[in-house]
Image: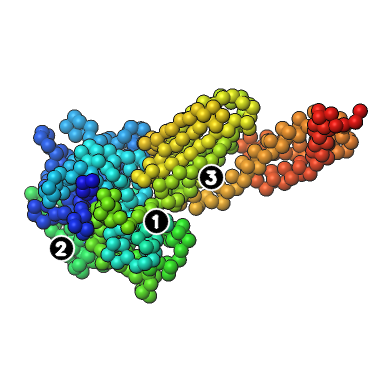
């Protein structure tokens, strides 16, 4: 097998690395630069320009220079990003159609734009090799959903690369870390704050096996938000100094954004810096002294937002921070001293355990890890194994509109799990399988990944058996198999694009699941009690019809009363009234107890019938 390159396809910058003679290396361009800005400029004619040149051209051509395209990967109109207006170039985000960038009469898909970046990285890698690489491992944020992962894979293919694996960025960073300072057994947190995304992963490293215990994060939180806060502040200062309105001129906005980011980066090593923007208009130049303290004051709320994800991941992994050995910092934005202070404070690193590890070059760890994964796949590192986990639970909708989880959140992948289901109606000809992703108890509150129908051999209800199997492959892509067990008729559906994913991101899903946990559980109990009540009332009515005459009047009346009580609650629920699970359960229990004599009588009659059929009964 040829070399497999590792690519960190970042929101702001991208990198390519490869394992050479057992050593992972980030590759540099002919000027020694290891970062390639994830910026693509589309000229009126000719090929797109990518990287440093495109980044430089942004101020002069903001409307045709595409930045942060990663935010739109696998996204649809209804899903659109709140930051799209601030990017300077046009973005078409309509209805359920994939987001595109319309430029010079052509609709650029995010995959095509990313492919331009990947082509440049492929060529860069090829310069140091005997032949152009054909295969790659590409990283994505842990919270990318299926559609976003698939879009990344497609971008790789459009760039002429065979995409061997899509792996999570923090996992890749941990791989890079693990190769250098791997203890026999340790637990680490990877705090990854990049340009556009924040990820927190907790991993266990055990004798060369990497396992992700939990991941948590936000695909819309990163250095760009810090830049935005600073740009807002500088725009005000500019206005007060009598300067032009930034919002009215895309060129000025782009210059200000660039100057703000540069100042932010300088303030990671300096305590004061000057922002100078000469001749914003022929008659106006802007100059401003910014201190690190001011920057920290402005951006503290952004950095503070990372705390909740750290705590959530610890809870999910069932760990306290003192159980961790290391917290490693990844992503360009983690170079900011304020970010380091926060991470240290969140995990209590001041006492020395866990240790705050900043030995990794935060920009390069992810690409190095991707290259190591490439090395593992091509056999360069045979004693390492990588285990990843699902970020959200996957399941199907069942009776009563509930979510039935088949693969729970944080399950190690690849994974295959199945369950058997039955039908609710007599002689049902088909069943609709509604595949869901999320943490909520009610199906409607989760993300809909897709629906398909499985045809059935009609049978009485409860007799038909259907097997549903979920398989998540090594790339995190879900394949759903549904089979009618009797006829063997089956369907396999690959959830390639998560078409119906609504615009809530994963984080919101998790937050909501925590927020609504109490109500959700109550709702589930209520639906379960309702289903039970429906089954029992139907069976009791049938029993009364056939055997009711044989019961003493008092017992009959008791059953009728209990039945009426349950029926009243069911009607109330149907009308949308609020009834508690507890009240339904109590009524169910009263009905159960009232029907005891009827159940015994029915059992006796069934037994008699059986014995009679066998000819054992005298007479
Ligand atoms: P990444 O997505 O990991 O490439 O991170 C890019 C983000 O890191 C951008 O928002 C950069 O402005 C930011 N960044 C890069 N270097 C520094 C630095 N030295 N100090 C603060 N932020 C930085």
Structural crowding at the residue carrying mark 2, measured as other residues with C-alpha within 10 Å and reported as few (<14), some (14–19) or many (≥20): few
Tag 1, which secondary structure?
Answer: strand
- Locate residue 610 relative to residue 333 in the image: left or right: right
The image quarter containing residue 302 is: bottom left
Depth check, mark 2 against mark 3: the one in front is 3
Mark positioned earlier in the residue sequence (1 or 2)? 1
The image quarter containing residue 60 is: top left
Q: Position of residue 156 (x, y in %)?
A: 24, 41
Q: Nearer the viewer, residue 590 or 142?
A: 142
Structural crowding at the residue carrying mark 3, measured as other residues with C-alpha within 10 Å and reported as few (<14), some (14–19) or many (≥20): many
Tag 3, which secondary structure?
Answer: loop
Q: Nearer the viewer, residue 323 or 176?
A: 176
Q: Position of residue 133 (x, y in %)?
A: 18, 45
- What's the CA distance linking mark 1 and mark 2? 43 Å
Circles 2 and 3 in contact, beta carbons < 8 Å? no
- Locate residue 413 relative to residue 285 in the image: left or right: right
Vertical order, 500 against 57 (above or below): above
Q: Position of residue 227 (x, y in %)?
A: 25, 55
Tag 2, which secondary structure?
Answer: strand
Q: Which residue is mark 2?
A: 274
Give the colouring mode of the picture: rainbow
**Numbered mark located on residue 239 in the image:** none
Q: Position of residue 331 (x, y in %)?
A: 27, 57
Q: Which residue is mark 1?
A: 212
- What's the CA distance linking mark 1 and mark 3? 25 Å
**Can residue 194 be seen from the camera position used here?**
no
Q: Quadrant of the C terminus?
A: top right
Vertical order, 566 against 22 (above or below): above
Q: Which residue is mark 3?
A: 441
Mark positioned earlier in the residue sequence (1 or 3)? 1
Vertical order, 486 against 149 (above or below): above
């Amino acid at each position: 097998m040829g070399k497999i390159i590792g690519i960190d396809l970042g929101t702001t910058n991208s990198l390519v690395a490869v394992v050479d003679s057992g050593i992972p290396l980030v590759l540099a361009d002919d000027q020694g630069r290891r970062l390639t800005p994830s910026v693509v400029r589309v000229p009126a004619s000719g090929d797109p320009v990518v990287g440093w040149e495109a980044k430089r051209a942004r101020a002069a051509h903001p409307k045709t220079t595409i930045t942060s395209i990663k935010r739109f990967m696998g996204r649809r109109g209804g899903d659109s990003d709140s930051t799209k207006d601030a990017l300077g170039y046009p973005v078409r985000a309509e209805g359920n159609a994939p987001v595109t960038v319309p430029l010079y009469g052509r609709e650029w898909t995010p995959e095509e734009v990313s492919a331009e970046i990947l082509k440049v990285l492929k060529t860069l890698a090829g310069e140091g090799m005997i032949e152009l690489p054909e295969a790659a491992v590409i990283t994505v944020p842990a919270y990318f959903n299926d559609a976003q992962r698939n879009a990344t894979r497609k971008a790789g293919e459009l760039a002429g690369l065979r995409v061997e694996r899509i792996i999570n960025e923090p996992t890749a960073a941990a791989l890079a870390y693990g190769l250098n300072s791997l203890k026999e057994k340790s637990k680490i947190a990877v705090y990854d704050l990049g340009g556009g995304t924040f990820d927190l992963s907790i991993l266990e490293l055990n004798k060369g096996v990497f396992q992700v215990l939990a991941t948590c994060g936000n695909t819309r939180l990163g250095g760009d938000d810090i830049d935005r806060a600073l740009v807002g502040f500088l725009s005000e200062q500019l206005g007060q100094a009598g300067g032009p309105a930034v919002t009215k001129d895309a060129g000025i906005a782009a210059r200000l954004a660039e100057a703000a980011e540069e100042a932010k980066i300088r303030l990671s090593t300096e305590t004061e810096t000057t922002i100078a923007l000469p001749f914003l208009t022929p008659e106006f130049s802007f100059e401003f002294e910014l201190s690190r303290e001011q920057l920290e004051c402005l951006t503290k709320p952004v950095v503070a937002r990372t705390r909740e994800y750290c705590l959530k991941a610890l809870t999910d992994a069932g760990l306290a921070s003192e159980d961790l050995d290391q917290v490693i910092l990844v992503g360009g934005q983690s170079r900011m001293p304020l970010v380091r202070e926060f991470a240290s404070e969140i995990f209590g690193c001041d006492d020395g355990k866990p240790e705050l590890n900043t030995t990794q070059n935060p920009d390069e760890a992810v690409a190095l890890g991707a290259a190591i994964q490439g090395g593992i796949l091509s056999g360069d590192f045979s004693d390492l194994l990588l285990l990843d986990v699902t970020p959200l639970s996957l399941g199907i909708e069942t009776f009563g509109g509930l979510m039935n989880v088949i693969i729970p959140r944080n399950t190690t992948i690849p994974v295959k799990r199945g369950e058997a289901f039955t039908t609710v109606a007599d002689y049902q000809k088909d069943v609709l399988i509604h595949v869901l992703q999320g943490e909520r108890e009610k199906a409607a509150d989760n993300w809909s990944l897709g629906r398909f129908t499985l045809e059935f051999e009609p049978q009485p209800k409860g007799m038909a058996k259907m097997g549903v199997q979920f398989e998540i492959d090594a790339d995190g892509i879900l394949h759903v198999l549904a089979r009618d067990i009797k006829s063997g008729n089956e369907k396999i559906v690959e959830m390639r694009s998560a078409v119906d994913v609504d615009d809530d991101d994963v984080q919101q899903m998790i937050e909501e699941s925590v927020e609504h946990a109490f109500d959700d559980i109550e709702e589930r109990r209520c639906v379960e009690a309702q289903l039970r009540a429906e089954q029992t009332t139907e069976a009791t009515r049938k029993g009364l019809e056939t055997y009711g005459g044989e019961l003493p009047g008092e017992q009959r009346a008791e059953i009728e009363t209990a039945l009426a009580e349950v029926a009243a609650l069911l009607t109330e629920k149907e009308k949308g009234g609020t009834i508690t699970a507890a009240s339904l359960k109590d009524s169910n229990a009263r009905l159960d107890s009232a029907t005891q004599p009827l159940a015994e009588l029915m059992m006796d009659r069934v037994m008699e019938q059986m014995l009679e059929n066998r000819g054992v009964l005298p007479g």
